[in-house]
Amino acid sequence: MKYKIMRQKISEFSSSLEPRLKKMFETCFYSSLDTAAKPMEDGTTFMLTGDIPAMWLRDSAVQVMGYLPYAKLDDDVNVLIRGLIKRQLNYIILDPYANAFNAEPNNQGHKDDITDSDNPWIWERKFEIDSLCYPLWLIEKYYEETKDESIFDDLFYKALEVIIQTFETEQYHFEKSKYFHYRPKYPQFPTLNNEGKGNPVGYTGLIWNGYRPSDDVCEYGYLVPSNMFASVILRWLISLKLPKDLKSRSEKLLSDIEQGIEKFGTVEHPKYGKIYAYEVDGLGGVNIMDDANVPSLLSLPYLGYCEKNDTLYQNTRKFILSKDNPYYYEGKFGKGVGSPHTPKDYIWHIAVIMQLLTSDSKQEKLACFDILMNTDAGLGVMHESFNKDNPHEFTREWFCWANTLFAIAIVDLKQGKLI
């Protein structure tokens, strides 16, 4: 039996859970492994996002996060994760501006999009900072668990050079970047205007970002939580024994981003005081909101950007979890953050899980847990979003990212002796 050690450990962990929770936990924990992971002939791992036949760099990294504690104990887990990392890095080298890829060069996906590249490997070419951050975050977490320095091989450094170069270029999007992307054939799905270059921006030191982690278009060019995620990754990279050139460039990027967030990324709110903005353009334009997708402002402690009790984060959190956030909803079956990506009044399971994982309050954690348990529509899995007044109305029945995070949340609650 493959994954024997991990399966044994999970069986031991879940044996003390009540029957319905035990079944939900195991289903969600193994969701990516049993339904989405595809070992490839070249030794890499292709990871479906769920009900879409493509691999997202962002989703695939999170989909194996629950397996990381077993990467040192179980050789099958190690092969799975290393194979995924190798495929992610090869995809980044192929095109750092793409967010989702095909298993083979079959030209499937959004082939009607207008962009500056036509590669049959690409499912979708929406430039998102987090798509480049997540694979590095996975490598960081993998190394923390295994201390396996062989992960820092030639492929890693080749991909890292591509990532750093892309970040540097997109600090000057209109001056230096060749990237453009738009989808005129499907106007119901907004893409970058201005012939795919996006709205005007001023220099801030931040990295320009075309699309949010929801794959929705950015209204303003600099997505603050994604830049914060980049700063987390850069800080980790600087701690490594990098070649001198890569180290100095990473240090400069980190300094630029930190200064940009400090100067442009905060606003004074009349009710909540100083809080983080969601998007800015460096020209005075500011978007005050939060989205359910991660990186989000709500998720900052989860990503390692700040502590849970950080004052600025707490101010921002109070705003996010209030009706002043245009995408916060309260209904008969729950309350939490939604997204312009899904219908009005639909709350995201990922956002409820992020609220749970970033809270120090036992009461708040258990309230989030109750919402998750009562909004699965009787299917025993998480969804993308659910109607706040009727959880049987939901989007995406098969969504591995949300399932993985549910399993991680249950481990968090169990370790905290809350369940």
Image: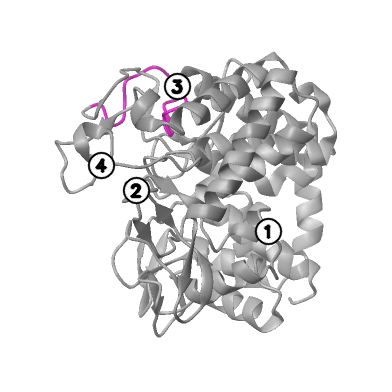
Name the amino acid, label 3: Asp
Q: Earlier in the sequence, mark 4 or mark 1?
A: 4
Q: Residue at x 42, y 46 (%)?
A: 222
Q: Check if residue 102 falls in the magenta segment.
A: yes
Q: CA distance from mark 2 to mark 3?
A: 20 Å
**Residue 417, horizontal then vertical, whole percent:** 80, 74
The residue at which mark 2 appears reads as 218
Q: Give how far apart the Cα atoms at labels 4 and 3 are.
A: 19 Å
Q: Quadrant of residue 416?
A: bottom right
- For the N terminus, the image quarter is top right
Please name the residue that numbered disc 1 is placed on: 306
Give the foreground label among 4 and 1.
1
Q: Assess whether residue 249 is covered by the magenta stretch.
A: no
Q: How many marks?
A: 4
On screen, residue 222 versus residue 194, left or right, reads right
User: Image check: 411 left or right of 146?
Assistant: left
Residue at x 61% of width, y 68% of height: 312
**Label 1 Cα crowd, 10 Å radius (few <14 / some 14-19 / many 20+):** some
SS of the residue at dot 2? loop
Residue 87 horizontal side relative to residue 18, left or right? left
Which quadrant is the C terminus positioned in? Answer: bottom right
Q: Which residues are magenta?
A: 96-111
Would you place residue 3 above or below residue 289 in this image? above
Residue beneath disc 3: 95
Residue at 55 percent of width and 64 percent of height:
298
